[in-house]
Image (spheres, helix red, strand yellow):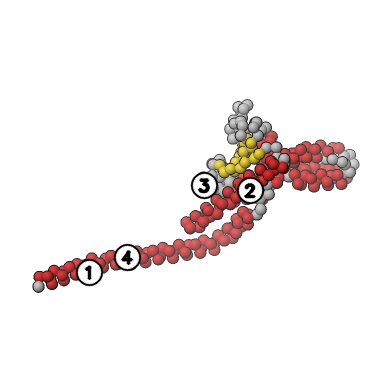
């Protein structure tokens, strides 16, 4: 008889202790689910709002980088020094040639570190101003 | 901003920045071997200048540093010339800004001075002459 009473008390204690743990677990689970849903919702909203900016940034980043100007900068300087002396507008007294030389000189000054452009301008100067560089 | 996106963007930006640096170093080696460049250039990421921060700046490493291996002190004009070659390229400047760089630094392996530029200044207007000396040069004057 005593044993039966003891068992029933033990069973009652066990059931009363188990309930709060179960509720706690369930509450934590629900909170976790809510948290995950919030993160997913934020991600979707963020993607929608920033997609244009992100795409623009990626377009700039994905452009191939051309380091040729940097690597030919000393050659460009030599060519620039030669061209700025030869194509100076003061060397041309004729009005039409003076205007062409003026335009070319501006282009040369703007592109003084761009070797490829300077080579194009050199050919243009040789053709339009009838000079040999 | 969502933390996951921040983490992903950090990894993406990191790889893009590394690709840019590696691309520069590879091209510099090729140019040196081909004889296009009289000096060997090497790019690396540096701390940058905190005064030059902008909205895209990397929070810690925002400097694009170019080191010229010459064995002798480069002249001020040569250092300026290397910087100008980068800053005159609008697409390149835009890319540097997007990748989080705000400072361009050029110096050589010998000597104690170099030049640095605020990259943001060259986004729209192109090249201008506002460059600062990294340290006092041998003459002892600091050009701001």
Q: Which residue is label 3 attached to?
A: B59
Asked whether B13 or A109 is in front, the reply is: B13
Label 4 and label 2: CA atoms lie apart by 53 Å
Chain ID, mark 3: B
Label 1 and label 3: CA atoms lie apart by 55 Å
* Among the two numbered marks 3 and 2 on one chain, the one whose residue lies closer to the N terminus: 2
Front of the two marks 1 and 3: 1
Q: Residues within 10 Å of mark 3 (few under 14, many from 20)?
A: few
Asked whether B15 or A93 is in front, the reply is: B15
Label 2 and label 1: CA atoms lie apart by 68 Å
Q: Which residue is label 1 attached to?
A: A15
Q: Quadrant of the C terminus of chain B?
A: top right
Q: Where does residue A63 sit, x and y in percent of width and height?
A: 65, 54
Residue B37 showing in the rendered view: yes
Query: What residue appears at the point 55 percent right and 50 percent down from the top-left corner?
Result: B14
Q: Where does residue A107 sit, x and y in percent of width and height?
A: 77, 45
Q: Which residue is label 2 attached to?
A: B23
Q: Which residue is label 4 attached to?
A: A25
* Mark 4 and mark 1 residues within 8 Å of each other at the beta carbon: no
* Mark 3 and mark 4 residues within 8 Å of each other at the beta carbon: no
Q: Residues within 10 Å of mark 2 (few under 14, many from 20)?
A: some
């Amino acid at each position: 008889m005593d044993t039966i009473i003891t068992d029933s008390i033990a069973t009652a204690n066990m059931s009363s202790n188990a309930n709060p743990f179960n509720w706690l677990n369930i509450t934590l689970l629900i909170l976790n689910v809510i948290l995950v849903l919030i993160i997913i919702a934020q991600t979707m909203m963020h993607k929608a709002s920033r997609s244009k900016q992100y795409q623009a940034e990626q377009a700039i980043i994905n452009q191939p980088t051309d380091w040729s100007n940097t690597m030919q900068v000393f050659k460009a300087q030599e060519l620039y020094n030669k061209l700025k002396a030869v194509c100076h507008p003061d060397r041309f007294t004729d009005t039409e040639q003076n205007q062409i030389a003026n335009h070319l000189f501006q282009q040369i000054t703007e592109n003084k570190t761009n070797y490829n452009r300077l080579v194009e301008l050199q050919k243009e100067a040789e053709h339009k101003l009838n000079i040999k560089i | 901003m969502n933390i996951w996106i921040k983490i992903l963007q950090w990894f993406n930006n990191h790889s893009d920045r590394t690709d840019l640096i590696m691309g520069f170093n590879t091209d510099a080696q090729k140019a040196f071997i081909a004889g296009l460049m009289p000096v060997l250039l090497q790019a690396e990421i540096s701390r940058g200048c905190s005064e030059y921060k902008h909205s895209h700046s990397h929070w810690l490493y925002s400097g694009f540093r170019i080191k010229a291996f010459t064995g002798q002190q480069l002249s001020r004009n040569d250092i300026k010339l290397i910087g100008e070659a980068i800053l005159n390229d609008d697409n390149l400047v835009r890319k540097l800004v997007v990748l989080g760089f705000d400072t361009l630094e050029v110096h050589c392996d010998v000597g104690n001075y170099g030049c640095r530029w605020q990259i943001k200044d060259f986004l729209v207007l192109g090249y201008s002459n506002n460059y600062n000396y990294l340290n006092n040069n041998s003459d002892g004057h600091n050009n701001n």
